[in-house]
Amino acid sequence: MSDPRPIALTMGDPAGIGPEIAAAAMAALEGRIPIRFLAERAALAAAIPGRPDSVHAPAIIRSIERGVDLVRSGACSALVTNPIAKKVLIDAGFGFPGHTEFLGHLTGAPRAVMMLAVPGLRVVPVTVHEPLARVPRLLTADLIVETARITAAALQRDFGIAAPRLALAGLNPHAGEGGAMGHEEDAIIRPAIARLQAEGLAVTGPHPADTMFHVAARARYDAALCMYHDQALIPLKTIDFDRGVNVTLGLPIVRTSPDHGTAFDIAGKGVANPASLIAAIELAAELAARRSI
């Protein structure tokens, strides 16, 4: 069952590749998926490709806010966001680390969780945009349990997986090697897994991260929960860089985005690949249709 309402597509940073990949995606999907591009015309007219400027921050933020409003009002079925540059917004006083946290704020979600997906692999970082040195201090059993619950619920509701299987990575090499290479697995991750299993969730781990992502291993789970950003994103981007999609879990709306940045270095040169944005729009339409059934 398809949803006839359009997908709301934000502008992103007007000096990046967002406007050009938006045009390419809309042309590629014309007649198949209706799209409402939330352009801030004054910003698009003034922006110089490849030259980020914090003067555009208010327009970038307005486009995101409009998209959320359109989806929450029912005028659009889902939100797809074009890439933003965090420094551009932060320099203008933006008070959020990125899209995910801002969308959680706008929708009133208790916690938004980031999933990255390509055909054959879904990964969820438990800690996201944090310096690696801070990760061991931030990692708690409660955080892992909450992230796993949100992930499992989204896999059931949005992806149609009745009994989701989650694989949890260890934090340290060899998942701690029995305490010889770190204690977080025994002190934090295993207790979290035990709690989740007691709730009836199909959870395994902690697994050594270096053996979780080959073909046979990926067949044994529906999503991998990783302890930090690069542990999750490096394998996914290596497997299928061009079709990666960022999905925000835990929101009352469907939101996806391409799994790449603003690419200021190639903006305006006509070489930007719209494949990830196209995949994000297609997945958003699929998830929105499933929610409306």
Image (cartoon, rainbow, N blue to C red):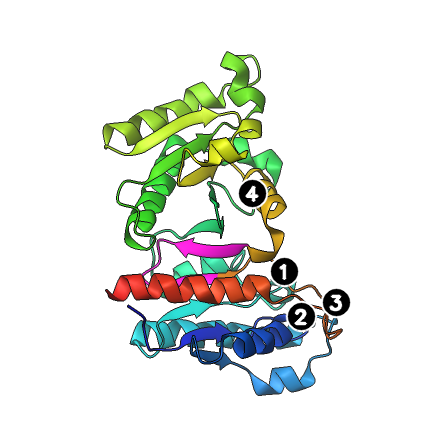
Amino acid carrying label 4: it is His
> In the image, what residue occupies the spot 51% across and 56% down?
245
Q: Which residue in the structure is indicated by mark 2? A: 16
- N-terminal of the pair, mark 1 or mark 3, is 1
Span of residues in magenta: 244-256
The quadrant of the rendering that contains the C terminus is: bottom left
Q: Is residue 218 above or below residue 184?
A: below
Q: Earlier in the sequence, mark 2 or mark 3?
A: 2
Q: Is residue 247 left or right of residue 135?
A: left
Few, some or many residues within 10 Å of mark 4 (<14, 14–19, 20+): many
Asked if marks 2 and 3 touch (Cβ < 8 Å), the reply is no
The three-letter amino acid code for the residue at tag 2 is Gly
Amino acid at dot 3: Ile
The mark that comes first in sequence, 1 or 4, is 4
Write the residue at 69% across / 72% down. 53
- Give the residue drawn at x 60%, y 47%: 237
Disc 4 designates what residue? 229
Res 277 visible: yes
| Separation (CA) of disc 1 from disc 2 | 8 Å
